[in-house]
Image (cartoon, rainbow, N blue to C red):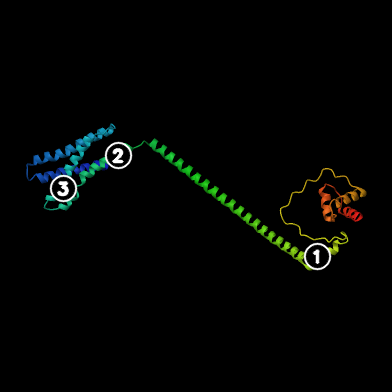
Amino acid sequence: MRTKTALPAAAMTTVSMVLTLAVVMMWLGTAVPWPVALIVGLGIDGGWLATLAYERRLAAQGDHSRTVTAVGWSFGLIATGVLVAHALTADRSAGAWLAVAWLPIAAKALWLVHGLWERTALTPMALNAIQDIQQEARDEAAVARARLRAEAATEETRLTAVTAAGARVARVQAQTAKALAGAWSTLETARQGEGTGRALTSVTSPVTDAVTARWVLPVWGPSEPTRAPALEAPPVLTDDALDALVDEIRHSEDPALSYREMATRFRAAGHSASEVRLRAAWKRVA
């Protein structure tokens, strides 16, 4: 894995050093003796190579020196400056020489990338551990998302069912209320009719002599819960006792109570008798 970044940097460095030496020999060879030009070119390349080797040694030890790094970049800038100056003063192919003047800087940048890669490189075991952790996290996230989607779908289904049931109950209640309203309207219309009073009076007059019964609709309102039936049936009253009790309740107020009022108070007092016997006793007393 290390060669993926080291080989390109080494190749770029070699090309830059050869190119720098060639440019120095061609450029300075016409002005000074060629041994002098060779020494200048080798000096630039040697200084660059020495600082690079020292930087690699420090990197292998886990250390770093800013001074050595600055000197190495200085040699790189000198090599780049030589190439640029030669390109600007060349009579022919100035553009071609200028196009390759960036090679020393590129070589230094590649070595910088290689150093960064070495400082962040991990062993295969660590990489496998990281991959396992990431895979486990992805699996947990996928399971959590699936669980949330399933819960959301279940809740949506439940709300839909509850809403539909509530709508059905509301429709039934509305229909029932409408039917009850119609029935009560019919009863009220019948009660307000002219012949209703006479018809009811003619029916109830044999029972309540000299008393005109008034037919009143029952009140449509909240109902009271009925009492629990007694465990033991109350004792049955004899005819004489029933007559005496009916007469006592009837004459408890002045004027005498009507049959309905007497029957209401009779049952409110806790007495028990069938409607037939109670009416018969009323007739005997009245």
- Residue located farthest toward the top when viewing the structure as drawn: 61
**Around disc 3, counting alpha carbons within 10 Å, would you say few (fewer than 14), some (14 to 19), or many (20 or more)?**
some
Residue 186 in the figure: left or right of residue 63: right
Residue 132 in the figure: left or right of residue 167: left
Residue 141 in the figure: left or right of residue 159: left
Q: Position of residue 104 (x, y in %)?
A: 20, 44
For the residue pair 281 and 179, the one nearer the viewer reads as 281
Q: Quadrant of the N terminus?
A: top left
Q: Earlier in the sequence, mark 2 or mark 1?
A: 2
Name the disc covering residue 197, or none. Answer: 1
Residue linked to disc 3: 84
Residue 122: quadrant of the picture? top left
The kind of secondary structure element at disc 2 is helix
Name the disc covering residue 2, or none. Answer: none
Q: Position of residue 2 (x, y in %)?
A: 31, 38
Q: Is residue 37 visible?
A: yes
Name the disc covering residue 116, or none. Answer: 2
Amino acid type, label 3: Val
Amino acid type, label 2: Leu
- Residue located farthest toward the bottom when viewing the structure as drawn: 194
Q: Is residue 2 visible?
A: no
Nearer to us: label 1 or label 3: 1
Q: Quadrant of the C terminus?
A: bottom right
In the depicted structure, whether residue 217 falls above or below residue 11: below
The reply to whether discs 2 and 1 touch (Cβ–Cβ < 8 Å) is no
For the residue pair 247 and 30, the one nearer the viewer reads as 247
The reply to whether discs 1 and 3 touch (Cβ–Cβ < 8 Å) is no
Residue 74 in the figure: left or right of residue 274: left
Amino acid type, label 1: Gly
In the depicted structure, whether residue 200 falls above or below residue 229: below
